[in-house]
Amino acid sequence: MNNINLTDSEIDAIRRQLKRVLESSFFRHSKRLPHLLRYVVEHTLTGEVDAIKERTLGMELFARKPDYETATDPIVRVTAGEVRKRLVQYYQEPDHANELHITLPSGSYVPTFGGPGLPPGIQALAEEDFPGAAASHAMELRQEEPFSQALPGASGARLDPSDLKENEPDTQAESAHDGIPKAQQRQHWRAIAVLGIGIGAAAVLAAAFLVLWRAPQSPIDFFWHPFLSQNQPVLISLADQSQDSIALRDPDNPSQLTSYGTPAVKNAFLTVALDNVSAAEKVIELLVSKHKQILLKGEATTDMTDLRSGPSILIGAYDNAWTLRALAPMRFRFTREPGWIPRITDTKSANRHWELTPAEGSTGAYTGYGIVARFTDSNTGMPTVIIAGLGRCGTLAAGQFVTNDNNLRELQRQARSNGNKDNIEVVLSTQVVDGQPGTPKIEAAYFW
């Protein structure tokens, strides 16, 4: 075990700052990122730097086997990269700019600690730690001694791996340096300058390599990455129905309802269809496995404030007004023919449409259809996904499509060939047998 040249008060300050960072919105919604940051900080503070290696991190934090291939399994590198990004975002906020900085340098898993104008062992303490006269004393200390003198390492208050030793300053070496002839000193600094240029060029090449290199992206991550990169909880707005009747909304006027069976009763108890619940269940299971928080609401209780607050998923077609409104400006949208025949129409091709044949509910097999869309809603500015179908099996198939790597692989391939645009809309088909949908198939896709 190596020793670290920090006082107890400085170590306590770093741990308090770590707690503050991990409780922020940039980290608290994740399990993986805080796990890694806490591990590397604690092992650095206790001097156990030998444990901060990629293979060890993979084994300790991500349950990898001792002989796993780090070259083909970049879990540690990818997670560390995300931690670096979140730390930068945290300290870019004005409220955090003057706090003690915890940094994960590029190319290393050993954190450094520092900050602008921080006094030794004091600044990182919360102001409530200094009531009354103690608070005034803390302010005096801030003015008297910069934090860069409190932590070992070069100016800028960084604690580098080479500083993990308890060494007193070599005053004899400093005195001898003062006696070096100026010509020799100039030669010395020229050598350092050349070395610095070489190191800088190597850093540029390394940065370019990192920009060009990307870890293989799974089809699931490809489709859901706008949601996974957001810190806010994900809203799922689920279509609902009155308990005593079925009412469908007009795609051209979503506020207009047409009731079937028993007329709708005012303030009737609301319920949801099983197909919508099944689709929501698959999506929730996926997003929870990605450490996302979920907010589930019915269509009737969802409002624009909800939709503007974070990413949203709209489930259901003719029974979800939010779905119909969001699809109104898009290429593929739900329409209805006279006699309330539901249809998916390609608005850029008048003769291209999809509808249930034979009518759903008849015996035997038939083809069902649905729409899946992923886009940034121009009205809310938030990532939005639509999962909706012509009838129950279309919605079920759409839910299966967006939660299965094999289903999404073809969409990922088509997205690449179309320039990896941010917005996607897909028409799906599925063969329905005995009331159960088969594997979803892409009928048409549009990228913009």
Image (cartoon, grey):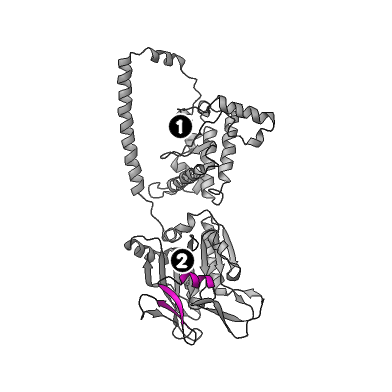
Could you say which quadrant of the image residue 12 lies in?
top right
Instruction: Identify the residue under disc 1.
Output: 161
| Rendering coords of residue 127 (x, y %) | 63, 36
| Rendering coords of residue 80 (x, y %) | 46, 45
Looking at the picture, which amino acid does disc 2 mark?
Answer: Val
Q: Which mark is first along the chain, 1 or 2?
A: 1
Residue 402 - label: 2
Can the viewer see residue 3?
no
Magenta-drawn stretch contains 343 = yes
Q: Nearer the viewer, residue 161 or 259?
A: 259
Total marks shown come to 2
Looking at the picture, which amino acid does disc 1 mark?
Answer: Pro
Q: Is residue 424 above or below residue 346?
A: above
Q: Is residue 269 left or right of residue 184?
A: right
Q: In this view, does 22 lie above or below 216?
A: above
| Rendering coords of residue 383 (x, y %) | 47, 61
Q: Nearer the viewer, residue 438 or 103?
A: 103
Using the numbered discs, state the Cα–Cα distance from disc 2 to disc 1 in whole angstroms: 44 Å
Q: In this view, does 78 lie to the left or right of 39?
A: left
Looking at the rendered structure, the secondary structure element under dot 2 is loop
Looking at the rendered structure, the secondary structure element under dot 1 is helix
Can the viewer see residue 37?
yes
Q: Residues within 10 Å of mark 2 (few under 14, many from 20)?
A: many
Could you say which quadrant of the image residue 219 lies in?
bottom left
Q: In this view, does 415 lie above or below 395?
A: above
Identified at 30% across, 24% down, the residue is 190
Which residues are drawn in magenta? 318-347
Residue 326 - label: none
Q: Is residue 127 left or right of residue 114?
A: right
Identified at 58% across, 42% down, the residue is 20
Magenta-drawn stretch contains 47 = no
